[in-house]
Amino acid sequence: MTSLLKTLENEQATVALGQQIAQWIVPPLTLYLTGDLGAGKTTFSRGIIQSLGHQGAVKSPTYTLVEPYEFSEMDVFHFDLYRLSDPEELEFMGIRDYFTHRSVCLVEWPDNGHGLLPKADIHLHLRYKESQRQVEIQALSPAGQAILSKIK
Ligand SMILES: Nc1ncnc2c1ncn2[C@@H]1O[C@H](COP(=O)(O)OP(=O)(O)OP(=O)(O)O)[C@@H](O)[C@H]1O
């Protein structure tokens, strides 16, 4: 599978990447979002979620672990696992019930999910390089590859 490197000049570029990807999402789909604190994971998620039709704010669910958004054709689950110390918390939440053929999972700090999450179709690595913000978008499945091939 392939990957793509993009520079994100400003916040709007991060939002716009989410908006682009949102048009091509066919559930089920899982995106992993990694990058340091403040790298732009929530900004990207906001681009996707608002583009799908959510009109309110999109905040990182740091304390609730997951924020669900229901749309006509899919359910989006925005996870932030930064504070997850015990994977049993995910089991207690009944995490497996979240994953259906309608589910789109956006997962911040996926390494803390300890293998309880679906495998990623796309992995976004957000980073700073020489004072620029960059994102490496990695396709990890045919569904992810189909989306990657359309990103401009
Ligand atoms: N490409 C960009 N260029 C400049 N600023 C950006 C860019 N993308 C996002 N930002 C800004 O960076 C700040 C942090 O972004 P955001 O909250 O999305 O990061 P995060 O990775 O979700 O952080 P955390 O891990 O703390 O939840 C926000 O103020 C956002 O507006």
Image (tube, rainbow, N blue to C red):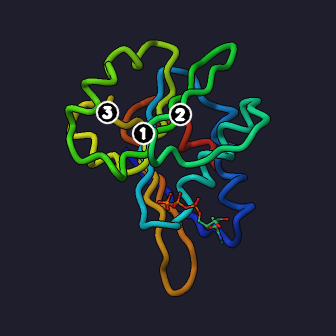
**Relative depth, front residue between 143 and 35:** 35
Kindly identify the residue that appears in the image at 72 percent across and 31 percent down: 52
x and y, in percent, of residue 19 in the image? 71, 44
Residue at the spot 49% in from the left edge and 21% down from the top edge: 103
* Front residue of this view, candidates 3 and 113: 113
**Helix, strand or loop for disc 1:** loop
**Amino acid type shown at disc 1:** Leu
| Depth order, front residue of 7/10 | 10
Mark 1 nearby-residue class (10 Å; few <14, some 14–19, many ≥20) = many
Classify 10 Å Cα crowding around label 2: few (below 14), some (14-19), many (20 and above). Answer: some
53 sits left or right of 133 in the view: right
Q: Dividing the image into four quarters, tell me where ligand 1 lies.
A: bottom right
Q: Where residue 83 sits in the image (x, y, percent)?
A: 34, 51
Query: Whole-Å distance between the Cαs marked 2 and 1?
Result: 7 Å
Q: Is mark 1 within 8 Å of ligand 1?
A: no
User: Which circle, 3 or 2, is nearer the viewer?
Assistant: 2
Please say if 82 is above or below 134. Answer: above
Question: In this image, 25 relative to 9: left or right?
Answer: left
The answer for how far apart the CA atoms under marks 3 and 1 are is 18 Å
Furthest residue to the bottom? 130
Mark positioned earlier in the residue sequence (3 or 2): 2
Hey, which quadrant is residue 11 in on the image?
Answer: bottom right
User: Are there few (<14), some (14-19), or many (20+) residues within 10 Å of tag 3?
Assistant: some
Residue to which mark 1 is pinned: 65
Residue 94 rendering spot, x and y as whole percentages:
32, 19
**Side (left or right) of 48 relative to 94:** right
Q: Which residue is mark 2?
A: 67
Say what amino acid the circle numbered 3 marks.
Lys
Q: Which residue is mark 3?
A: 119
